[in-house]
Amino acid sequence: MVSESRHGGSKKRYRISKRANQLSPSGIRKFFDLLASIEGVISLGVGEPDYATPWHIIESAIESLEKGQTMYTSNSGMPELRQELARYLHGHYGLDYDPNTELLITVGVSEALDLAMRAIINPGDEVIMPDPHYVAYDSCVILAGGKVVTVPTYEDDNFEISAADIEMNLTGNTRAILIGYPANPTGAVMSREKTEELTDVARHHGVLVISDEIYAKLVYGVEHVCVAALPGMRENTVLLGGFSKAYAMTGWRIGYAAAPAEIIAAMTKIHQYTMMCAPTMAQVAALEALKSGEESAAEMVEDYNRRRLFMVKGLRDIGLPCFEPKGAFYAFPSIRITGMTSEDFAEALLTEEKVAAVPGSAFGECGEGYIRCCYATSMADIEEALARMKRFVSKHRKD
């Protein structure tokens, strides 16, 4: 579109902002547009539980609706939910947060991440993160005006980000280190030793850590280390968590942030002008999950573990070397024996065998040569998907 300037010349009028133009389409969503056009697909792609939300949690929300609890809550979230969350964080990690000033209930962890970035980043600030990483990390930094600085991680190092590599990438513009362990897409879990090395660097240089711990409950035979609970890190961490994965509540869109009061206050100001508050009935459901959802969550994790072991063994048996995930619900096998790119492999697997997996390249340059397979689906579907993948790999392998 062209418009005349008052000096008689013409100039192009841009309708789309530079920041929006900087964003790449989600590598996951782009791929699933293709999936939607094919019938009979077994999906190992979408990162959500195949369980329905436990009935007692649903029932609590229904009851709240029947009582007419459909009004706005406090911007920060229901006081009783924040109080219960404070008790949860103390009981699990020994962390003490003031429910009135240091906790914020958000519309999923995605909003919490967006708020955190917009609250702390000034234009040009740098945020260090591992590669590969969850697809939204880059975009949240870019939309806040920041610059993404990636640190490669490798299967040989269990996809754990190195404190030494972080320190090499620190500059005077570094604002934060963003990590998410247990990790999407790799299933990696940071050891206590490696996490302490990372937090030592952060404290020494006065850099915030944004820790996305949405998969904290989904670990298998290893310890999840809460970053904020490490020595000296409570005041230097923005802890993000939520209910989507462990309680099978993805569609409820309910998460939280825990951080020092000044950071939560800044996040809340942005939240009140964008979301106002998280949905009331979802907050009621989250309260019920915290009070009595542990047994259901533990049962789901036990089932995911059986599927994890079955899928990893199955992938290896068909010739795809596979890193053993210790958390979340993803396997991240190498597809290099086919000589195909991650995207080509995923598209061909979908069209030829009707199995959907996500190209590893969607998660960063270090994801090239891998695909992400979600095992939060039925054992029958996993078994059939592996049979189809076996035919595919036999046909396309180069060795």
Image (cartoon, grey):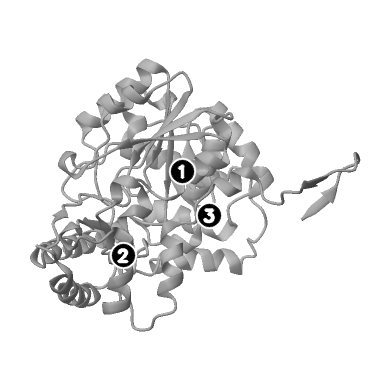
Q: Is residue 132 above or below residue 392?
A: above
Q: Residue at x 38, y 62 (%)?
A: 248
Q: As shown in the figure, which amino acid type bears the numbered disc 2? A: Asp
Q: Quick one: 92 or 361, which is closer to the camera?
A: 361
Nearer the viewer's eye, disc 2 or disc 1?
A: 2
Q: Residue at x 15, y 48 (%)?
A: 221
Q: As shown in the figure, which amino acid type bears the numbered disc 3? A: Gln
The circle on residue 283 is 3
Q: Is residue 385 above or below residue 94?
A: below
Reading the image, the residue beneath label 1 is: 138
Give the x, y percent position of residue 240. Answer: 43, 41
Give the x, y percent position of residue 377. Answer: 29, 69
Q: Residue at x 37, y 54 (%)?
A: 362
Q: Quick one: 380 or 145, which is closer to the camera?
A: 145
Secondary structure type for disc 3: helix
| Sequence-first tag of 1 and 3 | 1
| Sequence-first tag of 2 and 3 | 3
The circle on residue 344 is 2
Nearer the viewer's eye, disc 1 or disc 3?
A: 1
Secondary structure type for disc 1: helix
Q: As shown in the figure, which amino acid type bears the numbered disc 1? A: Asp
Left/right of residue 26 with respect to residue 196 in the rendered view: right
Location of the C terminus by quadrant is bottom left
The circle on residue 217 is none
Q: Quick one: 266 or 143, which is closer to the camera?
A: 143
Say which quarter of the image contains residue 292.
Answer: bottom left
Crowd class of label 2 (few under 14; some 14 to 19; many from 20; radius 10 Å): few
